[in-house]
Image (cartoon, helix red, strand yellow):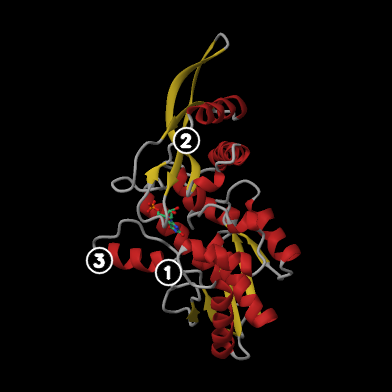
Amino acid sequence: KWDMAHFAKEQIKKIREQVGDNKVICALSGGVDSSVTAALLHEAIGDKLVPIFVDTGLLRKNEREQVEHAFKNVLHVPLITVDAREKFLSKLKGVVDPEEKRKIIGHTFIEVFDEEAKKHKDAKFLAQGTLYPDVIESVSVKGPSKTIKSHHNVGGLPDWMQFELIEPLRELFKDEVRKLGIELGLPSELVYRHPFPGPGLAIRIMGEVNEEDLNILREADAILIQELKAWGLYNDVWQAFAVLLNVRSVGVMGDNRTYDNTVAIRCVSSTDGMTATFSHLPHEFLERVSTRIINEVDGINRVVYDISSKPPATIEWE
Ligand code: XMP
């Protein structure tokens, strides 16, 4: 086990030597990895860091506020937020294929990011929160015809973007990144958040993504997370989230028949995301989550629990 204080010190020294007087741009996704990367960079080079946070509109409930608070108020890092919600939504309109959705999101992210990055002409480096499993998984699953899922945060940088890459977390696993985050003073609420994929909620809505469905999903997801925390189960699972299936089924509410959407609850245990088993959560807990989601979220009349493991299923549904 590496000592994270020591690791931080070494990396900071390395980053300072590599960067010199230049500026470094860092894209923040709201996730743990990019947050820790930005915090490390800030510790190393202070205001030579240009941290750019893109609000894709595909984030979870209150996620943007949480990230902005952590960076601006806790770490005192001058975060630049780019509001690209409309752009992402309009590009995703009518798109149903999972890989196509991922590609569009990846490209749009680069487009939005590039537009903002251009404003910082003196930046020569780009920092990314690539972890060891990202490196392995993108090498092992990507042959020319064998991409399982295109992870848009690995190798996603087009050649015309003339940045040198800084990837200080490349040798770390998630648990080590978390320790490093704590070491750097990030709030534990942020550091111990479950991993969240770059394409965000778009790959948790089956089929076309629209604002209305995003809002439904955000509410269902927030209830699940709130209950996990209330039952003291949040830190026992690797990831927990809701998936909007776009499958309608018949239900009954009072004297009326309903014909509404289904939400799947996905909770998995894992150490690195490469393999996973579905979490064996108490039925009473699942019952509570189901009752709350159906009662509190308009448009949902059925909740199912995903009992598949990875492999052969993946953690995300798309
Ligand atoms: P899967 O669904 O492949 O996911 O079992 C494994 C882990 O990776 C996350 N994931 C992503 N993370 N960009 C990311 O940054 C992506 O495109 C992406 N796709 C999946 C997923 O949430 C899980 O932790």
Q: Is residue 208 visible?
A: no
Question: What residue is disc 3 on?
Answer: 144
Give the residue displayed 53% in from the left and 55% down from the top.
88
Residue 156 numbered tag: 1
Dot 1 beta carbon under 8 Å from ligand 1: no
Residue neighbourhood size for the residue with mark 2, other residues' Cα within 10 Å, grouped as few (<14), some (14–19), many (≥20): some
Residue 230: image location, x then y, percent: 63, 38
Q: Amino acid at mark 2?
A: Leu
Residue 160: image location, x then y, percent: 44, 79
Q: Is residue 87 left or right of residue 318?
A: right
Q: Amino acid at mark 3?
A: Pro
Give the residue displayed 59% in from the left and 74% down from the top.
5
Q: Secondary structure at mark 1?
A: loop
Quarter of the image holding residue 211?
top right
Quarter of the image holding residue 38?
bottom right
Q: Secondary structure at mark 3?
A: loop
Q: Is residue 102 left or right of residue 241?
A: left
Residue 249 numbered tag: none
Q: Is residue 162 visible?
A: yes
Q: Secondary structure at mark 2?
A: loop
- Would you place residue 13 above or below residue 278 in this image? below
Observer-side mark, 3 or 2, equals: 2
Looking at the image, tell me whether mark 1 or mark 2 is earlier in sequence order: 1
Contact check, label 3 and label 2, Cβ < 8 Å? no
Question: What residue is disc 2 on?
Answer: 281
Gap between marks 3 and 2 measured at Cα: 39 Å
Observer-side mark, 1 or 2, equals: 2
Give the residue displayed 60% in from the left and 66% down from the top.
181
Farthest residue to the top: give it: 255
- Would you place residue 236 above or below residue 21 in this image? above
Q: Nearer the viewer, residue 284 or 123?
A: 284
Residue 112: image location, x then y, percent: 55, 66
